[in-house]
Each structure stands twice: as structure tokens, then as C-alpha cells.
Amino acid sequence: MPFAYAPGTSLGRYQLRRIIGRGSTSTVWLAWDPASQQEVAIKCIAADVLNDPVRGKLHRTLLINEASLANKLQHPHIVAIHDAVIADDHAYIVMDYVAGGTLEVHTQRPGLLPIERIVELIFKCTRALDYACQIGVTHRDIKPANILLTRDGDIRLSDFGAALFSTMERTQVEGVGSPAYMSPQQVREMPLNHQTDIYSLGVVLYQLLAGELPFQASNKYSMVYQIIHVEPPPPSAHRPGIPPALDAVVARAMQKDIGLRYATWAEFTHDLAQAFRNRRLKPRDDDSAAPEMFRLLRTLAFFGDFSDVELWEVARFSRLERIAAGTVLMKDGEQGDRLYVVAEGELAISKSGRTLTILTGGECCGEMSVVARERKLRANDVIATTDSLLCAIDGEQIRRASETCRMRFYEAFLQVLASRLSVANVRLADSWPPGT
């Protein structure tokens, strides 16, 4: 007899509360996990699906695939899987509860998001899918319904049941996915790699920008024909104000020929940020500048050990400053509580008129006053010897950052200190009178 799902009943250790989603093959419940003392989402396969010999086997396999990734896909923009049960009369998978709904509500008017916000969300998707790609996982079912929103506006990718595993020996599930978002290679049932996800995310980006899908069809066969043979109009044809560079990003992501499509997620991420470079940015309380800042910070040696999520946090509270050659950035003995990381140009560090060192791209200054407990005084003079571009970060922002991000800064400061002490010791040894 099939399991009876109802509010107030228990499913294993989980206490069912209410239905939060329903599809043709499954129902998603909000539940309480007494072990972790938190709410979770449980996707339960419908009894009639499980009892069907063909569909039952397919959906059990999808759950097994998704559950097998629980310990592999650990990323801040991917929904975490906690548990799964696959039995004769019931099958379900337990995951994070993400309370903000899905991107589906933002794919048509009047729910369209600002262009800056769309860029940020797709940027985060590219980072998560690049992470999955690095461990040999291709999602194969990227669509707005599988991109969840948190209460604070962040995103989580979900539903890796149809994923392709390039590093695992397992029979792949065929015949799954949403036709409107499938790549030409996927609808033709050709061998796939991560570039099929790049195409699908390009379709999602198109839909979020334009408010409609690139291809309109009354049936699956017409949709497949258009995906293979028809070139869609650019998103800007549906929504004036979309910059041409963003149209170009969509076009390249959706290239029918994989040789012309983005070859890597890094290329997609880079062009997405570049497309936004020349737009007039809003104030820093809006996150529109964060993707471009993230891309820049990732090139700087100082941030080499920061994870994507830590670096994204930094991108939100840092800012760029251009200064002319000859600008005095810091004075010995003055109050100061700001860290600078050189992105372009050179800074001279001096003491009592004597140049101690020259800082170039990826190096920092001001770290000692940031970590000082009491009087935050500058220990040296700092002057720009060339026109320079600096990443400026207030010390208070570092101290208010998440614990992992804050600790990453302090680790970087220690590495800087160790390197400078080593150089100082070498100089001292070279200048020491011989024979002493």
C-alpha cells in the first residue's frame, strides 16, 4: 500500500508541514528535521509514478543520481542534499529549504528584474556550474524552475537528477530535460558536455532579459526544429535598453555550433562581467558592480586563496579608486583604517624619506592599521609613482565580514608580513659589516 503523505505525519524522522510545490510526477513538502533543528524541503515521487514500470524506474534512477552527489556538490549556490530514501512504496529526497521561490516568476512581465540584477544572478549561476564542471558534473536540465531564490535574494541551483557524470561509471538517464531550454546537441541526442549547460543558461538569460523564450512553438516538434535551424532575435528586440554587449553574450552562449559557443564557463563569466563594464553603475548599496569587481579581484595575487563565496563577499564591500601619479595615499603617523590592494600601477613605501619598497599589482598596503587593536596609525608614507587603480576596503568592513572571509584576510596579512620580514632579513644581512 503506498505511503500516505499528509500534514502532521512523519516521513522517517521528518515531520511534514505543508505542500510548497507540486509537479506532474512529484510533490515538494516543507518539513521539520528535529535532528538539525531546521526546516527542510522533501521531494516525494507520486505513488502512480512509482507503480508504473517504466516511469518508476526512471524516477528512482533520478533520485539515486541526485543523492549520489550529496557529498560532491558542496557550493554556496547549489542546494545541499541531506538524505534520500528509495523504497517500493515511497521514494523521496531531502534538501535545503529555499524560501524565495524560483526564477520562473521573473521570466515574464510584470515580474522582469532590472538588467543589473539579472547579470548578478546569472553570474552566480556560471560560478556554480563551473564548480560542478570541475568535478565532472553536467546538469542537463538548467531552467528557471531549477534556480531557486533565497529570502535575501541569493540563488541556489537545484535538481541534479538528470546530471551527466563524466568521471563516474554509470548508465546515464536519457529522455529527460525541458525542450525549450535544450541545446541543439541535446535535442538531437548527441554526446554532451558542459557546453549544453552553457547553452541552456544562455536561454535562461535570454528569457530573463526579454520576458519570453527565444523560440515560440505550439508543440515539441516545432520547438526542436527551431532550436536546430532558427536564429532568434536578440533580447533587445523585446526589451529596449539592453546593451549590445549583453545581446552578444546571449548570442554566443546560444550558438548552435559548439565550436562557436563559449568553450568554458570562465569565458562566459568574463564576457558577462565585461558586458557590464561600460554601463553607468548604481550606488554601492546595489550589487550591480559586484560581478565586475569579482572578476578583477580574482586576478590579484592577494586574493589567491579566497574561495568564490569569500571573494564574492569582498566584491560587495570593496570599491575601486583611481589615483594620479604623485598622490600621497598615506602619511607616517596619521590615523587610517583602510586597506589598499594594487590592481594597476605602482606605489612607493617610504620611511623618513627613504624608499623601502615598491608595490605592484596584487600587493597591498595599510594592513597593519586594519589589524591594530587600539590606535590605528600609519607606519609609513605611501605615494603613487604612476597613475594607479586601487581596490579600497575599509577596515570596519573586514571586521564585520563573515568569519571565514575575515580569517582569509588575516591569513593573507600574515603571508604579507612573513614575506616582508624575509626581505628585511636579507637586506639586513647584506648590509651587516663583515667579520662581526
Image (spheres, rainbow, N blue to C red):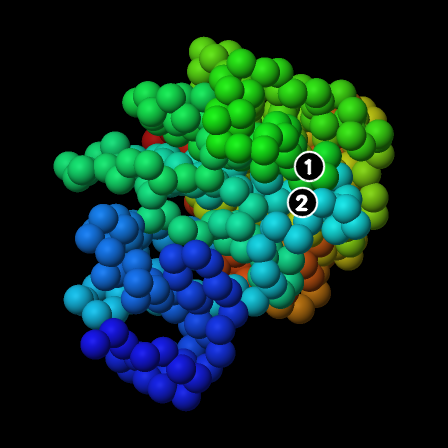
Which badge, 2 or 1, is on the more N-terminal residue?
2
Instruction: Tell me the distance, in whole angstroms, between the alpha carbons under discs 2 and 1.
Output: 7 Å
Q: Residue at x 30, y 58 (%)?
A: 49
Identify the mark at residue 362; answer none if there is no mark: none
Write down the residue under mark 1. Answer: 212
Residue 246 in sight in this render: yes
Q: Quadrant for the N terminus, please.
A: bottom left
Label 2 crowd bin: few (<14), some (14–19), many (20+), radius 10 Å: many
Task: Judge left or right: residue 326 versus residue 213.
Answer: right
Write down the residue under mark 2. Answer: 107
In-front residue for pair 51/160: 51
Q: Quadrant of residue 175?
A: top left
- Residue farthest along the left direction in this orientation: 169
Task: Judge left or right: residue 308 versus residue 6.
Answer: right
Residue 353, how many percent across, how many down? Answer: 73, 34
Residue 363 in sight in this render: no
Q: Quadrant for the C terminus, please.
A: top left
Q: Residue at x 72, y 39 (%)?
A: 211
Q: Is residue 234 above or below residue 101?
A: above
Label 1 crowd bin: few (<14), some (14–19), many (20+), radius 10 Å: some
Q: Quadrant of residue 45?
A: bottom left
Residue 278, how many percent across, how many down? Answer: 79, 26
Which amino acid type is shown beneath numbered disc 1? Glu
Q: Is residue 29 above or below residue 409?
A: below
In-front residue for pair 420/57: 57
Which amino acid type is shown beneath numbered disc 2? Thr
Residue 164, how many percent across, how many down? Answer: 30, 36
In what element is the residue under mark 2? loop
In what element is the residue under mark 1? loop
Q: Quadrant of residue 432?
A: top left
Residue 306, how many percent across, how many down? Answer: 48, 45
Task: Judge left or right: residue 169 versus residue 418.
Answer: left
